[in-house]
Image (cartoon, rainbow, N blue to C red):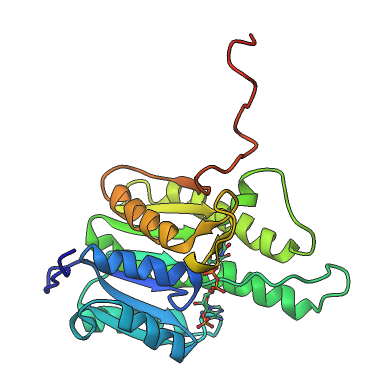
Amino acid sequence: MAEPVVGPDSPVALITGATGVVGTQAAIALRARGYRVALHGRNRRRMARVVRACPDPEESVLALTGDLAEEGTAAALVDAVTDRFGRLDVLVAAAGAFPKEDFESADDQVWDSILSLNLSAQTKLLRRALGPLKKARPGVVVFIGSEPVTRPVARPDQEAYYASKGGLLGLARGLQASLLDEPVSTVIVHPDWTLPDQEVTDPSAQLPAGNLGAALAHIVEMAGLVRVREVTLHPLGSATESVDRTPRNTG
Ligand SMILES: NC(=O)c1ccc[n+]([C@@H]2O[C@H](COP(=O)([O-])OP(=O)(O)OC[C@H]3O[C@@H](n4cnc5c(N)ncnc54)[C@H](OP(=O)(O)O)[C@@H]3O)[C@@H](O)[C@H]2O)c1
């Protein structure tokens, strides 16, 4: 495939969690589609690896590190992106944490830190990013939810995670209403269990992260054309509860 050429008019995507399983692949897929990408994460070694995986990084990649749960990070991040590239068209908010904790004995701080990163930090970041996103026409925001919040199933010891992702779903729906007349599309994507491609052992139950990254890049482009609100992504061949497996012709 030809290397995507970028210039001053190329759209810009900010991807948080870019050092993680999902964000790395979203960044690579968006870069392959000609986006200039601003990558955010904490781990500098993994960040260097993601930057190397992007073509033409000097011209098209801005790597930023910091703790999103800290006060001031969101503002500094958006300022750094607009200072470098002069615009912001897409925000893919893929930073997140999902530790397992026993509900009763877990430290309150663990609950606060999960809610703070998975929900409050996303809110603060989008508040800062909305100004430049509105100028993008269309601006696109992609929140990463979680498949279980779309249906009445859950696994034990992940109450804070489910609470944060349920809250994110509420945030996305609220913003879809509040931003109806603005040139900004807010999408929430609920991926099923996702693993780095090489770690997938059961393709009917696990989504390869490369496929998810490519799907996210498609969703970003789709959201610039039509209103996309909520997308749930399952591995190919997975049996979900929404599939009626009654044999045909049984009435
Ligand atoms: N993987 C799945 O099965 C799956 C399924 C559904 C939804 N999701 C959602 O997708 C998102 C990404 O998941 P993932 O699998 O890519 O997780 P991951 O591999 O653990 O990556 C998490 C990312 O978030 C960043 N991060 C964590 N805490 C941060 C903080 N305080 N400040 C700034 N960045 C921080 C990490 O940065 P560093 O690594 O540099 O610290 C990393 O880039 C999460 O919201 C998750 O809930 C994942």
- Looking at the rendered structure, the number of numbered marks drawn on it comes to 0
Q: Quadrant of ligand 1?
A: bottom right
Quarter occupied by residue 54? bottom left
Which residue sits at x=82%, y=75%? 106
Residue 185 visible to an observer of this rendering? yes
Q: Is residue 210 above or below residue 247?
A: below
Which residue sits at x=49%, y=88%? 43
Quarter of the image where the C terminus is located:
top right
Q: Seen in the image, is 209 located left or right of residue 110?
A: left
Where is residue 126? Give x, y as percent: 43, 67
Q: Seen in the image, is 231 located left or right of residue 185?
A: right
Which residue sits at x=57%, y=56%? 206
Where is residue 189? Give x, y as percent: 48, 53
Quarter of the image where the N terminus is located:
bottom left
Give 201 or 101, whichever is nearer the viewer: 201
Give 125 or 47, whichever is nearer the viewer: 47
Where is residue 225? Give x, y as percent: 26, 45
Where is residue 214? Give x, y as percent: 36, 58
